[in-house]
Image (cartoon, rainbow, N blue to C red):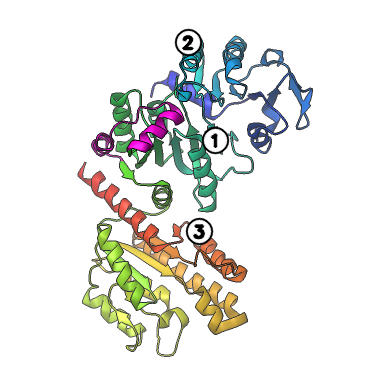
Amino acid sequence: MKEERLRKFEYIFNPRTVAVIGASDSDGFSQALMGTKLRDSLFLVNPKYKELHGKRCYASILDIEGGIDYVVIAVPALLVPRVLAECIEKGVKAVHVFTAGFSETGVEERKVLEDKVQKIARGKVSLIGPNCMGICCPKSGLAFVPGVLTEEGPVGVISQSGTFAEQFLSIGELRNVKFSKVISYGNAIDLDCPDFLEYLAHDSETEVIALYIEGTKNGKRLKAAMTEAAKLKPVLALKGGVTEHGRRAASSHTGSLAGSPEIWSSLFRQAGVIQVEDFDELLDTTLALSCVPLPLGKGTAMITNSGGFSVLETDLCVKAGLEVPQFTKETIAELRKMVPLAGTSINNPLDAWPIFYNTPGTTGTLADAITTLSHDKNIHSIVLHFDEVRYLRHVLGEATENFLKELVKIMIQGCRYARDEMGKTIVICVSLDAYSEDEVDRRYHLLAKKAFEREQFPVYPALGAAIKALSNLYRYNAQYRNS
């Protein structure tokens, strides 16, 4: 990316000063930015107020002394042309138009209004939107959701939908996903998806790109940008509007021409982008890509404590395009030394429940078992399924918490060795009945989840989600190696 374009994006993601035009005592942008490091560099503009959030409120951006790098415009649509012209007069470098009510309405006069805004901005200021949430960048403090600003991390998100970007950020924080940049670009009358893809492809702070797109104005340019990005780092894409009704919704949402699902699938495939089916799969796969090594093959070992679940796990893996190979004779021999014969299965999946609980007859720990599996030449990934919170409470009562902490510590020890020393892909499923209202169950579940997350393991609430994410990692790596 040329030096001039890099400078333009520097003002977008790392502004020195920010103004919100249309600020009020309830607008989300002012509240979000007041809680970040940009607080002291934030200027509020609205002629209705003298003061907001303890800061002076200006009647116009032209009244502010000094330069402004980045502006959020949150005024009624009919006022946007005038306000934008004032921003250009002020010398603002980048403008985010949050305001909706343009071409996405399908009303001809609003399309004309959007064209007017586009002409005013062209060549004079970088414009994001209209009809979008704009930019979140944890490093600089730029934010659009009050109270949600994660630690800096490797995930970049580009979303045509504002709500999608907001949800990805909010739910991602709960799932231990850490972001470099989150971008909502809406109607894209100036900066469009390819512009942001080109930037994130070369952004050293972004290692994984997650994309939500409803349509494009320039398929050729989008394909070129996706291809360039996918050569440098994993790119995942969720296409909105793959059905007739969905395409109609996309048109009324961001004014997008969605196109046929077959064309889009072909476009993603040719560009080297991994297409996913829904929001959860995009988040789940992004999480895994951000914190574990890629699997070098299909061979998957699963550790469970239920014979029934072992059958289901095998089916899920095979349906997802993975393999559940037999362990080598050497692996089986080592496991048999640790685990008693009765009631166990020293096969793959490994149903070795006694070593979960240090029952009589065991001579090794779960860490020893995981370590042994990590040396098996047929195994490239390990899925650890833990759903024993209720059973532990039933058996141990008040002693559950201390036992659980020790058990999780042992599991982490083995998983860390498999990942860090042997380069294996490790995914964790810590499952709990979604309908459980027992607060103690939930607290213990959270205890285990957080312990794995602190060690940067991807944790999933359901087995199917863990296996699908793992399958997508294999699919990406196989594609990458063959490209």
Q: Is residue 185 magenta?
A: no
- Vertical arrangement, residue 210 with respect to residue 406, above or below: above
| Residue density around tag 3, few if under 14, some if 14–19, many if 20 or more, within 10 Å | some
* Residue at the farthest left position: 482
Residue at screen point 46% across, 83% down: 358
Tell me, yes or no, whether the highlighted magenta stretch contains residue 265: yes
How many angstroms separate mark 2 from mark 1 (CA)?
A: 26 Å
Q: Mark 2 near mark 1, Cβ–Cβ under 8 Å? A: no
Image position, residue 22 (x, y; %): 66, 23
Residue 67, quarter of picture: top right
Residue 123 visible? The answer is: yes
Category of crowding for the residue at label 1, using alpha-carbon neighbours closer than 10 angstroms: few (below 14), some (14–19), many (at least 20): many
Q: Which residue is mark 2?
A: 119
Foreground disc of the pair 3, 1:
1
The residue beneath circle 3 is 453
The kind of residue on which mark 2 rests is: Lys
- Looking at the figure, which quarter contains the N terminus? top left
The magenta segment: 244-273
- Residue 474: x and y in percent read 29, 53
Q: Secondary structure at mark 1?
A: strand
**Which residue is rendered at x = 34% and y = 46% of the image?**
276
Q: Give, as a three-letter code, the residue at label 3.
A: Glu
Q: Earlier in the sequence, mark 3 or mark 1?
A: 1
Quadrant into which the C terminus falls: top left
**Label 1 sits on what residue type?**
Cys
Q: Nearer the viewer, residue 212 or 109?
A: 109
Taking depth in this image into account, of 448 and 308 the one nearest to the observer is: 308
Residue pictured at 64% horizontal, 35% vertical: 28
| Magenta span dominant secondary structure | helix
Give 199 or 364, whichever is nearer the viewer. 199
State the count of labels: 3
The residue that label 1 is drawn on is 136
